[in-house]
Image (tube, helix red, strand yellow):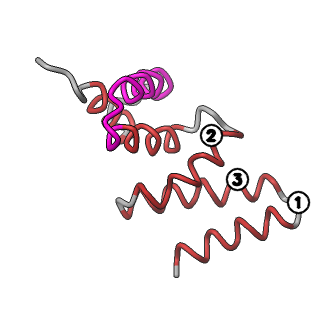
Amino acid sequence: MGDRAILNHAGQCKSMGFAAGHVIMHKLFIDYALKCRNLEKAEPSAQVVLQVDPEHVPAMVITMMRAGGNGDAEKVHAIARRILELENNPKNPWRRLAEMGLRTGRED
């Protein structure tokens, strides 16, 4: 029900011409999905957000993790490097996930 409530509100914002509200609701949905550890349901929202805000780190994390699930280590590394450039706080969970992403597919 939570999924539907957030996404329905995003749809209402879009239909009323409130583009900023539409994107905000998708950003909220990404945060919600990350907390629920359900990347698959956040992927469409990440695509919406990245079209408007290509450096939205949580949306980039979704894309990076989905690429990792698909075995695309090159894409994971590229996104992880960009996240590390954008997020300087070493305690930030997105930065830690990006650091883990850089280790994906590497033979040490």
Indicate the amino acid at tag 2.
Leu
Query: Which residue in the protein does label 2 denote?
Result: 50
Depth order, front residue of 70/86 = 70
Q: Quadrant of residue 76?
A: top left
Q: Quadrant of residue 80?
A: top left
Taking the spot 81% from the left edge, 54% from the top edge, the residue there is 19
In the visual, does 52 lie left or right of 42?
A: right
Query: Which residue in the protein does label 1 denote?
Result: 17
Indicate the amino acid at tag 1.
Gly
Taking the spot 45% from the left edge, 45% from the top edge, the residue there is 62
Taking the spot 64% from the left edge, 46% from the top edge, the residue there is 49
Q: Are marks 1 and 2 in contact (CB under 8 Å)?
A: no
Q: Is-magenta flag for residue 80?
A: yes
Secondary structure under the numbered disc 3 in the rendered image: helix
Depth order, front residue of 77/20 = 77
Indicate the amino acid at tag 3.
Val
Q: Position of residue 39 (x, y in %)?
A: 41, 55
Query: Which residue in the protein does label 3 denote?
Result: 23
Magenta-colored segment: predominant secondary structure: helix
Instruction: Give whichever of discs 1 and 2 has the lower sequence position.
Output: 1
Q: Position of residue 77 (x, y in %)?
A: 37, 24
Q: Which residues are magenta?
A: 68-87
In the visual, does 45 lie left or right of 88?
A: right
Q: Quadrant of residue 17?
A: bottom right
Secondary structure under the numbered disc 2 in the rendered image: helix
